[in-house]
Amino acid sequence: MRLHVGCAMWAHTPWQGRYLPHPLGPDERLRAYASWCNAVEGNTTFYATPGRQTVESWARQTDEDFGFLVKLPRTVTHERRLAGGEEELRAFLAAIEPLGGRVSALWVQLPGSFGPDDLGALAAFLRTLPRSYRYAVEVRHRAFFEEGRAARLLEGVLRGVRAEWVPFDTAVLFADRPVTDAEREAWTRKPRLPRRVTALTDRPIVRYIGRDDAERTAEGWRPWIEVFRAWLREGRTPTMFVHTPDNADALALARRFHDEIRAGLPEVEPLPEPMPAQPLTLF
């Protein structure tokens, strides 16, 4: 049994010297992160397509079973709304080619304005994509979560191409008023949507954001513990991405989630031993 866990990034200043060694060169940062987690969200590709040499470095720093959830460029998903972005998409696919099987899924994150009336565009777009990759779609229009017909139509589109529906669980973030600056900012930026726990494929993916208090974050993911264990018992290979508003403890929290799943399901493969944050000494 394999469970993937990860964060929204692999380099974060609050982790330096605390969880990860510091300083680290660009060719070592992902390697250090991968000693803590076995998956990562590729958010940077949303803003700019990386150079091929950069992606080759990512591949060198990770094992073949490490998972990248790589976000499609915003020019394709948000600006062109899945129509007419063929050139940008070709450049993106060529750039990420060195990752090979490390790409757990290509992530189609859609704007909140992309609703049920746009499903034809999504279906047509997904049918044009190469079948060598898996696909994961994140929607934020409330109709998909509150209207049964809209949800069923979306599920039909996704099942037709074996794509997963990625929920973003923000329930604990909005459970009560924010108490830190980062939480207040997250309140203005994150979607407020109902929790969804249905998997469409054998590779379900969940994005979860807690609070800046680690214990409240762990408390908020309790509903997911048995969901993930059930998925694993069914033979699925799920992924959990753990966020907090400031992400200061997200790295350790992602590993903690993995530990909690394994505590009740020891058949799950362990994570690697973390790279020491401080150099070892004789005394």
Image (cartoon, helix red, strand yellow):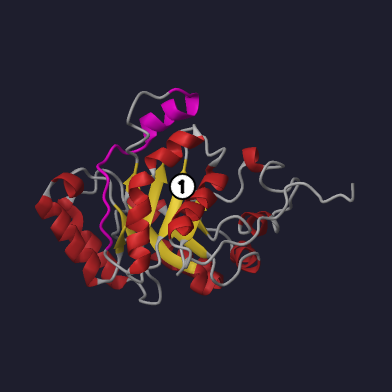
Residue 216 located within the stretch drawn in magenta: no
Specify the farthest residue to the right: 283
- Is residue 38 placed above or below 282 in the rendered structure? below
Q: How many marks?
A: 1
Residue at 50 percent of width and 36 percent of height: 214
Q: In this view, does 115 lie to the left or right of 249?
A: left
Q: Quadrant of the N terminus?
A: bottom left
Q: Position of residue 215 (x, y in %)?
A: 48, 35
Specify the farthest residue to the left: 149
Give the image quarter of residue 72. Answer: bottom left
Q: In this view, does 260 lie to the left or right of 228?
A: right
Residue at 22 percent of width and 71 percent of height: 160
Visible residue check, residue 204: no
Residue at 34 percent of width and 40 percent of height: 170
The segment highlighted magenta reads 179-199
Residue 186 located within the stretch drawn in magenta: yes
Visible residue check, residue 277: yes
Amino acid type at circle 1 is Val
Q: Is residue 107 left or right of residue 18?
A: left
Give the image quarter of residue 33. Answer: bottom right
Q: Where is residue 59 in the image (x, y as percent from the top left)?
A: 60, 68
Q: In this view, does 81 lie to the left or right of 271?
A: left
Residue for badge 1 = 242
Give the image quarter of residue 211. Answer: top left
Q: Position of residue 147 (x, y in %)?
A: 12, 47
- Compare residues 37 and 77 and report the one nearer the observer: 37
* Element under disc 1: strand
- Compare residues 126 and 204 and report the one nearer the observer: 204
Q: Where is residue 268 in the image (x, y as percent from the top left)?
A: 48, 65
Label 1 packing within 10 angstroms: few (<14), some (14-19), many (20+): many
